Amino acid sequence: MRVTFPDGSIKEFNRGITPGEIAKNISEGLFRNAVGALVDGKLWDLNRPIEFDCELKIITKKDKEAPEIYRHTMSHILAQAVMRIYGAENVRLGIGPTIENGFYYDFDIVNATIKEEDLEKIEKEMKKIIKEDLPIERFELPKDEAIKLMKSKGQIYKVELIKEIEDKKVSFYKQGEFVDLCRGPHLPRTGMIKHFKLLSVSGAYWRGSEKNPMLQRIYGTSFASKEELDNYLRMIEEAKKRDHRKLGPKLGLFFINSEVAAGMPIFLPKGATILNELMNFSRELHKKYGYTEVITPLVMNVKLWHQSGHWDHYKENMYFTEKEEIEYAIKPMNCPGHILIYKNNVVSYRDLPIRLFEFGKVHRYERSGVLHGLLRVRAFTQDDAHIFCRQDQIEEEVSKVVKLIDELYKPFGFSYRATLSTMPEDHMGDEETWNKATDALKKVLEDINLNFDIAEGEGAFYGPKVDFHVKDSLGREWQCATIQLDFQMPERFEISYVDKDGSEKRPVMIHTAKYGSLERFFGILIEHFAGAFPLWLSPIQVIILPVSDKFVDYAEEIYKILEDNNIRVSLDDRNETLGYKIRDAQINKIPYMIIVGEKEVESGKISIRKRDGSEQKDILIGEFIEDLKNIIKDRR
């Protein structure tokens, strides 16, 4: 058989040779570092025979595909350890996939609850399995034999999964006494990966449905080197300190009352101040790029959502209400409302593009188990925009959206990458139209030299999209901005424009949000800045700290001057020591403290202390205000 390598070279081998044998044939060094292979683009075990002509890439621990393989193996080592500790007859296995930066496994254990303190003994058993260096073997069975095998082991969840597999044969992996239903691939031996850590334990419904049993899920992480693992664990600890769910209420930004409004944040004055600044910035940029701001209803007749396709493809995520025997939906998206605005007037080709923009409040049902502070909510605000344009305007309009996004992210210090998501399984319209839209987006991204990855099947139900993933100060990625190209909704709503020859033509619709969810972006910012917002965003920009009651009058004079200059200022005139007031201001992460004492009163100047601890003395109040205004203007 012929094997084509990444460099384009081709070699012939006997059928049935394994990737491991091919790696050894190339060099001993490659073989020693190999963990798996890519065969025609699919992950493959090193010890699994190849029977056909193919393209082959040997994967080493340094390759981006490697974690998928060694973390998958680590999930099996975890499951084997749990079965050894709690007894194989008492443990029913769920699933154990890899996830971003780690893996997990779900367990149904008879008369036992795994607690955080149990993770240490499970880790100890995992290390023992790693030290045993057990060979990992792949084998296949016909479906009926596979079901019989899993039934004999009491693995009811595996039996359920096997029955749904369409293939006539199913694959298993065996290491020592442990056997698991799995597609793989895996490492050749358990001793090939040593650097791991179990992180937490939680509950998880089988297959994500509240109607199914609650299983116990253990999360873990694993890396190719101890240094990578240590760095990741340090990042996790830092992330815990920055957790917006703790910092938000602590800093008086927001809270969530789960008893009356689960997944629906309540913003306090300081939080509202930051949200307003974010919206002001977005408004400024949208106006610069030619958008007109609009407002659409929160509740609309369900017939609108039937027409848009949301009823067929998104109904399970929507909220409904009924009055006077008419059913209404609380909007999950703003696009149908913007289409109504477009249809309100006759549109000429000269009017295009039309760019509509809204801070639209939307509601989407999320299961209670996945709600997560501001990052996963049921009610949120989108800086949502829709561009109606001719097909020959697509490239220019998408290019401008990318420029707007780039300009929006700069003040926050974010870098980003893009992904192009293609047609999902549940979609509207025909494949030809989808390909047309996808090719149009791809061409734009290539023409403007924006690097992007392909996310197969991840598009919106009405069109392909480009998502922007920002990287925060801890190196974590968050999906925020999106651009979606839509040929479907203009067709469903029969919107048109009058072309230069007098004929009616369909416009193209571009859906785009820059922050994405304003609430989610706020949560990301809290963690990105660890609550220490830049001056322009800080809810309190300056706090005045009189040394004692004698200096409150002068402090109030300074307060009035700052307030008149639109500086967000606070005065701490409590009967507390200066040291206490400084510590409190630092805890609240206020950028500037003005210290007012006898020297300042006599000189008519001020002393400044920044939140990083640095100090400046004998500063003229006018100069200080001018500096603040410049920093705020530049959004620093």
Image: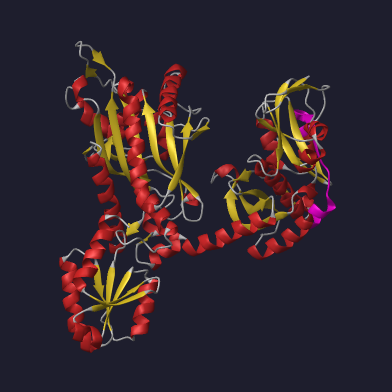
Residue 356 visible in the picture = yes
In the image, 18 versus 450, the foreground residue is: 450
Q: Residue at x 22, y 41 (%)?
A: 287
Name the foreground residue: 400 vs 317.
400
- Dividing the picture into quarters, in which one does residue 246 lie? bottom left
Residue at 37% across, 47% down = 409
Point out residue 364 in the picture as x, y percentages from the top left corner: 39, 43
Q: How many marks?
A: 0
* Magenta region, residue range: 128-147
Quarter of the picture containing the N terminus is top right
Is residue 514 visible to the viewer in this orientation of the structure? Answer: no
Q: Is 609 left, or right, of 26 in this rendering?
A: left
Instruction: Give the percent coordinates (x, y) of residue 394.
Output: 33, 25
Which of the 4 image quarters holds residue 3? top right
Q: Quadrant of residue 604?
A: bottom left
- Side (left or right) of 40 relative to 298: right
**Residue at 50% across, 56% down:** 474
Please give left or right for residue 508 compared with residue 118 in the image: left
Residue 151 drawn at (x, y percent): 76, 39
Q: Is residue 470 left or right of residue 634?
A: right
187 or 64: nearer the viewer = 64
Residue 77 to residue 240: above or below: above
Task: Say whether residue 517 is magenta.
Answer: no
Query: With respect to residue 139, does 132 lie above or below?
Result: below
